[in-house]
Image (tube, grey):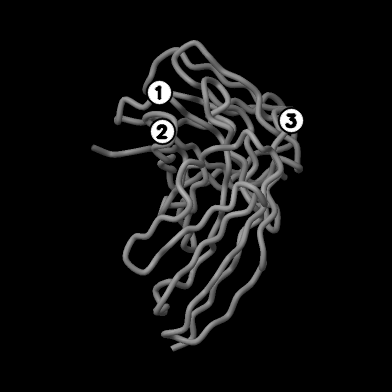
Amino acid sequence: GENVEQHPSTLSVQEGDSAVIKCTYSDSASNYFPWYKQELGKGPQLIIDIRSNVGEKKDQRIAVTLNKTAKHFSLHITETQPEDSAVYFCAATAGGGTSYGKLTFGQGTILTVHP
Amino acid sequence: NAGVTQTPKFQVLKTGQSMTLQCAQDMNHEYMSWYRQDPGMGLRLIHYSVGAGITDQGEVPNGYNVSRSTTEDFPLRLLSAAPSQTSVYFCASSYSQGSGYTFGSGTRLTVV
């Protein structure tokens, strides 16, 4: 099955700096890669996603890049703010029929943005 | 539009007891899943469903049962609770492939 590795496990930055979180996946059939943000005591919330036919996607201060050949994808947050502090998870799925239900998550990155 | 609703929010069980964690969504989503979240382990898939009447096992299905008789509901049953099932449980739903999952607020379960 799919295996997703996420690094780093913790990331501390100063307000205004950029933050980058990286994930690798094992199943070459995976074609959908979402990123989730989880605040304390809440469920994960989808912040951005990318499909395998796209190399990069941006949404304001957040961007995701995908390298299918190397089987890795990354989350980039620019101009970080204290409210960006949370746990971030990457995920991957092969998609297609019943396989889409099998969303495999990375271990998570605790991002702390210092004012 | 309430999204994904999980009940209860907190539960304490004794070893060997059974219970059902409820999950309901009002978004007409076909895909629904149950995850457990443990410290340092991320989110691990327990069971999932791609439509009413269709379920399949995830990464950690042992000790749990599911059924999907309606599009809206996807209950998770613990047959005989064990301390190893102490965790936070999340239910999630999605409209279709590639549209992203919406998560509930979770159920914090403690088995003593």
Q: Which chain carries label 3?
A: B
Classify A43 as above or below A87: above
Classify A95 as above or below A112: above
**Mark with earlier residue (3, 1):** 3
Question: At which x and y percent is residue A106?
Answer: 64, 52
Q: What element carries label 3?
A: loop
In this view, the residue in front, B5 or A4, is A4
Quadrant including the N terminus of chain A: top right
- State the separation of the CA atoms marked 2 and 1: 7 Å
Q: Residue B16 carries which label?
A: 3
Q: Which numbered disc, 2 or 3, marks the residue closer to the eye?
A: 2
Q: On the picture, is A81 further left or further right than A104?
A: left
Q: Are marks 2 and 1 in contact (CB under 8 Å)?
A: yes
Q: Mark 2 lies on which chain?
A: B
Residue at 57% from the left image edge and 47% from the top image edge: A91
Q: Is mark 1 on a helix, strand or loop?
A: loop
Residue at 64% from the left image edge and 72% from the top image edge: A10
Residue at 52% from the left image edge and 14% from the top image edge: B54
Q: Mark 1 points at which residue?
A: B30
In this view, the residue in front, A28 or A34, is A28
Residue at 40% from the left image edge and 15% from the top image edge: B70
- Which amino acid does the dot numbered 2 rest on? Ser
In this view, the residue in front, A21 or B70, is A21
Q: Which mark is residue A4?
A: none
Label 2 crowd (10 A; few <14 / some 14-19 / many >=20): many
